[in-house]
């Protein structure tokens, strides 16, 4: 039956199909490796890990219950076990004690469970949307801000020749797939949409993100009243970078009572320094800073009026912002746009600590034949135009650099005139070639349906169901970690150490002390590396004990304390 399998009767019963799932039973155990990760259970449950599970997911009879599978996957993410395969190198019995089992499932078994959970197409997206609606409703601010940005996942495999995307962090065009994420101001995620063929930020916002936000974003009585009283009031504000700049798109959103906040892609000359004044503002992280800001009304090419705000840096550079949010203060809008970097920090943290870019399953699936992609012929012509234009630029620079100085001999003057003539002839020839290529590109369709591509140009997409399911669990784990970090920051002298400290707590050994009479499960976390950290840990234990969290599948209330066996 494998290592650490002590519940032999239950396993036999499960094998013949008469056991629904084994009972969650804890035994008194000392020095459980990584037992500190149990401190995340209250936060995971508060974030909805199991709340929508009964309606969304079910498993047939077997030894491992579905709640244990969900908890295992979430705790794996928090323990920085970045893939199911890495579970091979973890002690199965130690992890079993953490979950109230004899051992955790083998990698093959866990993969089979995940495969069963992800058979229904779109189920993971529905579950993610249910959680996101709940998370959005918890936002305290009456002014709703949603941040949308793309994240490129590079693919190095050989299953399919995916389209190439520009990867900013690599500064290269690589085969990849694009995910568009919706986050809160502090970087906490709501939802993401996968695009095997990247249509761009404007198209994704208009076709996917905005319709989803219209269905999901809360509309309280206060918001309804504000919309009725002020025709310029906005339901919520969408924040994005310059890639989403489009006056026509801004106007469409304004008609829907949705405000935008973005950078000005085409700012004009700098404003006089005298227009700027100091504003004391509070950043999303709580720090108070002073910004030099100025504001004017601005009209775009489609006659749409909006607010243009500029920030003056110490070096004299002016950063231009555009918004159709007419209610928020100038300082609040500046802070909200610059908080967009919280989303970039989220991507980086998730890649480093949660394995966001890792594949969950190998294999591909067909792309809808109606999906339009960039015409390969158009791309080749465009590449040739760029190449010829570069050559012309270099020839022009060389032509301008060739100069005639005084005191030259007749032969030298002749060579000068000959070189000038050659360069001018090459430039004229390149101009003809570039113009011809442009005419060909103009007559070539930019996008074509994928079904019209020749077989050698076609591609499939990476499977997405299991990836979205695992990523949703990682979102829950990240949000749970963030809630614990916010509790730690209140008691730390250096708030930036909070995430490092919570990771240390998750890795710390713990003693498990169940009391069936008192119906409690005491988790005694071993001492940390410093007495100051132990004091902070005591505060965290007190805060978690106030939640009176019952461990799933039992009637045992979790109680956390600091100590050692």
Image (cartoon, helix red, strand yellow):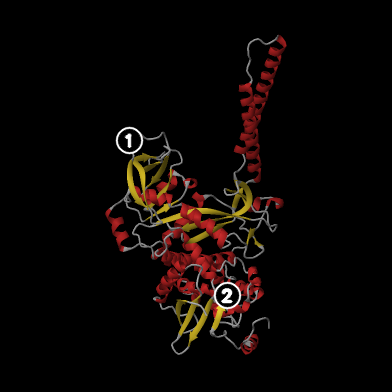
State the SS at label 1: helix
| Disc 2 secondary structure class | loop
Pick the front one: 281 or 429? 281
Residue 25 seen in the current view: no
Count of numbered circles on the image: 2
Q: Quadrant of the N terminus?
A: bottom right
Residue 319 falls in image quadrant: top left
Residue 164 seen anywhere in this rendered image of the structure: yes
Rendering coords of residue 179 (x, y %): 55, 56
In percent of width and height, residue 133 lies at 43, 65
From the top left corner, tell me how far across and down residue 558 is, in percent.
45, 79
Residue sitting at 53 percent across and 49 percent down? 200
Name the residue tied to disc 1: 274
Q: Is residue 364 left or right of residue 295?
A: right
**Crowdedness near tag 1: few (<14), some (14–19) or many (≥20) residues, C-alpha within 10 Å:** few
**Marks 2 and 1, how far apart in space?**
62 Å
- Mark carried by residue 448: none
Mark 2 is surrounded, within 10 Å at the Cα level, by few (under 14), some (14 to 19) or many (20 or more) other residues, namely some
Q: Which residue has dot 2 on it?
A: 33
Q: Which residue is situated farthest in the front direction here? A: 531
Q: Nearer the viewer, residue 329 or 525?
A: 525
Q: Is residue 63 above or below residue 182?
A: below
Residue 509 lies, with reference to residue 317, above or below; the image says below
Residue 287: quadrant of the picture: bottom left
Q: Position of residue 93 (x, y in %)?
A: 61, 79
Q: Nearer the viewer, mark 2 or mark 1?
A: 2
- Relative horizontal placement of residue 20, taking residue 407 as reference (left or right): left
């Amino acid at each position: 039956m494998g290592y650490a399998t002590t519940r032999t009767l239950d396993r036999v019963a499960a094998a013949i199909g008469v056991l629904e799932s084994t009972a969650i039973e804890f035994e008194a155990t000392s020095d459980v490796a990584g037992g500190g990760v149990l401190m995340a259970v209250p936060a995971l449950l508060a974030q909805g890990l199991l709340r929508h599970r009964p309606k969304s997911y079910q498993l047939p009879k077997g030894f491992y219950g579905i709640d244990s599978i969900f908890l295992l996957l979430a705790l794996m993410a928090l323990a920085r076990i970045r893939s199911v395969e890495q579970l091979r190198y973890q002690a199965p019995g130690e992890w079993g004690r953490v979950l109230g089992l004899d051992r955790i499932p083998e990698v093959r078994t866990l993969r089979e469970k995940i495969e069963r959970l992800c058979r229904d197409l779109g189920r993971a997206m529905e579950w993610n949307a249910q959680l996101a609606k709940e998370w959005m409703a918890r936002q305290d601010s009456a002014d709703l801000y949603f941040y949308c940005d793309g994240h490129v996942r590079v693919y190095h495999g050989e299953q399919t020749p995916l389209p190439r995307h520009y990867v900013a962090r690599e500064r290269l065009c690589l085969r990849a797939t694009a995910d568009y994420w919706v986050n809160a101001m502090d970087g906490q995620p709501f939802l993401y949409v996968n695009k095997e063929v990247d249509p761009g930020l404007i198209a994704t916002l208009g076709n996917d993100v905005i319709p989803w936000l219209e269905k999901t974003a809360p509309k309280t009585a206060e918001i309804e009243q504000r919309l009725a009283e002020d025709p310029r009031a906005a339901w919520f504000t969408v924040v994005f970078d310059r890639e989403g700049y489009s006056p026509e798109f801004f106007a469409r959103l304004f008609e829907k009572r949705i405000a935008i906040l973005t950078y000005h892609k085409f700012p004009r000359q700098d404003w006089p320094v005298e227009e700027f004044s100091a504003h004391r503002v509070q950043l999303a992280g709580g720090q108070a800073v002073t910004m030099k800001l100025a504001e004017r009304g601005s009209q775009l090419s489609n006659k749409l009026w909006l607010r243009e705000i500029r920030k003056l840096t110490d070096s004299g550079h002016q950063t231009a912002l555009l918004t159709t949010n007419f209610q928020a203060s100038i300082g609040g809008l500046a802070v909200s746009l610059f908080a967009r970097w919280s989303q970039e920090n989220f991507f980086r943290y998730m890649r480093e600590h949660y394995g966001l870019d890792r594949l969950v399953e190998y294999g591909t699936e067909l792309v809808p034949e109606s999906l339009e992609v960039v015409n390969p012929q158009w791309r080749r012509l465009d590449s040739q135009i760029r190449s010829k234009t570069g050559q012309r630029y270099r020839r022009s620079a060389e032509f301008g650099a060739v100069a005639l100085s005084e005191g030259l001999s007749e032969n030298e003057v002749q060579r000068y005139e000959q070189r000038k003539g050659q360069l001018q002839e090459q430039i004229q020839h390149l101009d003809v070639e570039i113009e011809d290529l442009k005419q060909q590109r103009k007559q070539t369709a930019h996008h074509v349906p994928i079904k019209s591509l020749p077989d050698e140009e076609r591609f499939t997409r990476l499977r997405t169901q299991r990836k979205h399911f695992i990523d949703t669990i990682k979102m829950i784990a990240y949000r749970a970690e963030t809630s614990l970090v916010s509790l730690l920051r209140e008691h730390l002298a250096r708030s930036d150490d909070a995430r490092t400290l919570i990771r240390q707590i998750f890795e710390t050994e713990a003693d498990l002390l169940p009391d069936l009479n008192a119906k409690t499960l005491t988790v005694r976390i071993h001492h940390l590396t410093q007495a100051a950290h132990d004091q902070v840990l005591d505060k965290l234990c007190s805060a978690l004990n106030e939640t009176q969290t019952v461990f799933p599948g039992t009637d045992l209330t979790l109680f956390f304390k600091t100590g050692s066996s």
